[in-house]
Amino acid sequence: MYIERTVLQSEQTSIQRYPLKWRILYVRARFEKKIEKQLLDMGIKTFLPLREVLRQWTDRRKKVVVPLFPSYIFVHVNERQRIKTLDVFGTVKYVQFSGKLAEVRPDIIESIRIAVDGPARLNVVSTQLKPGASVKVMYGPLAGMRGNLVEYRGSKKVAIILESIQQALVVEVSSAYIAEDCSGAKESK
């Protein structure tokens, strides 16, 4: 009984001292699925957004499942787990910005999860906005997300860069779903 209590207190102290945070793990190319499985076997919560694409070979075409962000895996770890994950073969490093470990807010992870699990294609659309404008998604699964409009891709698609993950995420929604972000914030906090 005393040992169980000590273990629980130790785990609770560890959680308080080292809170779980979503981090971005950079891995070797084409190792994402293997590393994700190994991390899950270690008991580490991961998120590897996948998408289905059509690949063309000389003799055939085939649908394959590939990572949405090649060479990146989102991991929900504390400091101790973060260090242990670097021992997995194929991991390279954690993403850093200005020498500080990148941390992804849970709402961003959830928005990406909804976007990946949702309709096959999501796009942000607006004819009044110019590249470079700050935009905010007002409705839909990505509601509340902010970013900068990078470019138009076709008649109904635009690329928005989300600062916290430093990736251009292309989403397709009705043009009524986005608006210019007048608050000056690059992304919701």
Image (cartoon, helix red, strand yellow):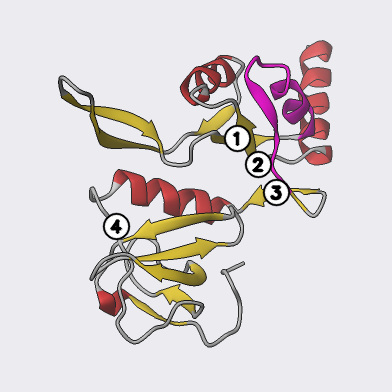
Image position of 5 with respect to 25: above or below: above
Distance in Å between CA atoms under marks 2 and 4:
24 Å
In the rendered view, tell whether residue 9 sits above or below residue 4.
below
What whole-number distance in Å separates the C-alpha atoms at marks 1 and 2?
Answer: 5 Å
| Label 3 secondary element | loop
Please say whether residue 120 is one of the residues in the magenta stretch.
no
Where is mark 2, residue-wise?
A: 23
Give the class, few, some or many, for how many residues have Cα within 10 Å of label 3's Cα (few <14, many ≥20).
some
- Foreground mark, 3 or 1? 3
Farthest left residue in view: 60
Residue that mark 4 sits on: 122
The label shown at residue 75 is 1
On whether residue 80 falls in the magenta region, the answer is yes
Work out how far the residue at label 4 is from the one at label 1, CA to CA, in angstroms.
Answer: 24 Å
| Disc with the residue nearer the chain's start (4 vs 3) | 3
Whether pointer 1 and pointer 2 mark residues with C-beta atoms closer than 8 Å, the reply is yes
Question: Which residue is pictured at 23% across the width and 71% down the height?
Answer: 155
The answer to whether 65 appears left or right of 19 in the picture is: left
Specify few, some or many for label 1: CA neighbours under 10 Å numbering under 14, 14-19, or 20 or more. Answer: many
Which quadrant would residue 52 be assigned to in this image?
top left
The location of residue 97, given as percent across then percent down, is: 74, 52
Is residue 137 shown above or below 14? below
Q: Given contact means CB atoms under 8 Å apart, are the residues at marks 3 and 2 in contact? A: yes
Q: Amino acid at mark 4?
A: Leu
